[in-house]
Image (cartoon, helix red, strand yellow):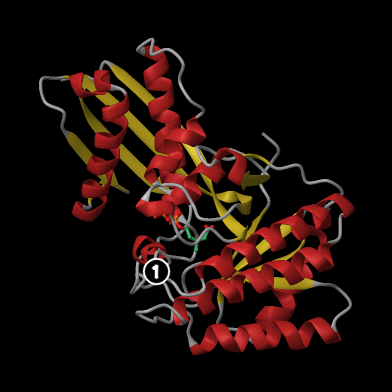
Amino acid sequence: MSPVWEFEKRAPSNIAFIKYWGKKNGKQRPINSSLSMTLKNAETKMKLQAFKDQRFAFDFLFEGERKPDFQKRIEIYFEKIASLYPILREFSYRIESSNSFPHSAGIASSASSYAALAKCLSSFLKELKVKELPHESYLARLGSGSACRSCFSPFSIWEEEDFEQAKSFPRGQMPPLGDTIVLIDKKRKKVSSSMGHSFMDSHHYKEARIKRANLHLKKMKESFQRGDFKSLGELMEKEALELHALMMTSEDPFILFSSQTLEIIHWVKKMREKLNFPFYFTLDAGPNIHLISLKRDQKKLQSILLTDFPSLEIILDEQGDEV
Ligand code: DP6
């Protein structure tokens, strides 16, 4: 059977500077606003083929292989979207996906994957003449919260006034930024992001966290406006440590960084004093580190880092192009 429609889309990943951690009543809306940098090189390529069919069925291949756990998540996602657009039930689907970066490298693959899939679905729904379609960021959010930010570049904000979707964030006077990703552990996370989010429901620091995130966001917006990389960096480090502090202080405490993560964090603080250019760290929900510097300093940073840690595996990325 040949497909009646076929779409191929790409979407980048992103790294949050203000972290999304915790959802409202288990819904796909966050308890606080978040702000992220969209990456340039780390992206997912997604091919969606739709077949006219009696069955609403799926065949999902990740880098050429069947992955039952991904397949399950895709099915749940399509169920959600089909409850909004029942016409999708008149087809079966073959989905092929691949990443430009290693899996579990501390690069949010769910963000780039759902953003790419949302782009495919959005194009498909347009072809099916569905009227009043929301922005693809809305469809991406229903798959993964952070994915809604991957639909804008180079910076994106998912803000309280409209938690249905993200929007583009103006970079003000901020010079171009680089992201040197330090791979510390490529194993699958012990606690998934969805589980981590759910721990925020009854977290005793929940209200304090919301206030802190709002304050950090307000200050970070000013940093962008002024082009003040130092204050941006200090805020992103606070956010990263606060994210992990929330994990460690939840009712079921858990720790996602490793001793090497801490070693690099101490190194960053020490080297910042010594060197004459600034760079800061941020962490996702895992042990890997994103070192954010000015783009023009990234090569210097890479060489100093590899001199002190010759066996480190790193990936060089940077802020995405304006779209
Ligand atoms: C720590 O977007 O992966 O990376 O909405 O359940 O898919 P779901 O969660 P996800 O959470 C991302 C958490 C984070 C912070 C961030 O990207 O803002």
Comparing 118 with 93, the one in front is 118
- Residue beneath the point at 42% across and 77% down: 250
Measured as percent of width and height from the top left, residue 285 is found at 47, 68
Comparing 50 with 131, the one in front is 131
- Residue beneath the point at 43% across and 22% down: 123
Q: Amino acid at mark 1?
A: Ser
SS of the residue under disc 1: loop
Q: Which residue is mark 1?
A: 202
Residue 57's place in the image compared with 3, above or below, is below
Q: Quadrant of the C terminus?
A: top right
Q: Quadrant of residue 256?
A: bottom left
Q: Quadrant of residue 78?
A: top left
Measured as percent of width and height from the top left, residue 31 is found at 51, 55
Q: How many marks?
A: 1
- Residue beneath the point at 38% across and 19% down: 125
Residue 219's place in the image compared with 267, above or below, is above
Q: Is residue 227 left or right of residue 313?
A: right
- Residue beneath the point at 68% across and 67% down: 236
Residue 27's place in the image compared with 300, above or below, is above
Crowding at mark 1 (Cα within 10 Å: few <14, some 14-19, many 20+)? few
Residue 195's place in the image compared with 94, above or below, is below
Q: Quadrant of residue 318?
A: bottom right
Measured as percent of width and height from the top left, residue 223 is found at 82, 58
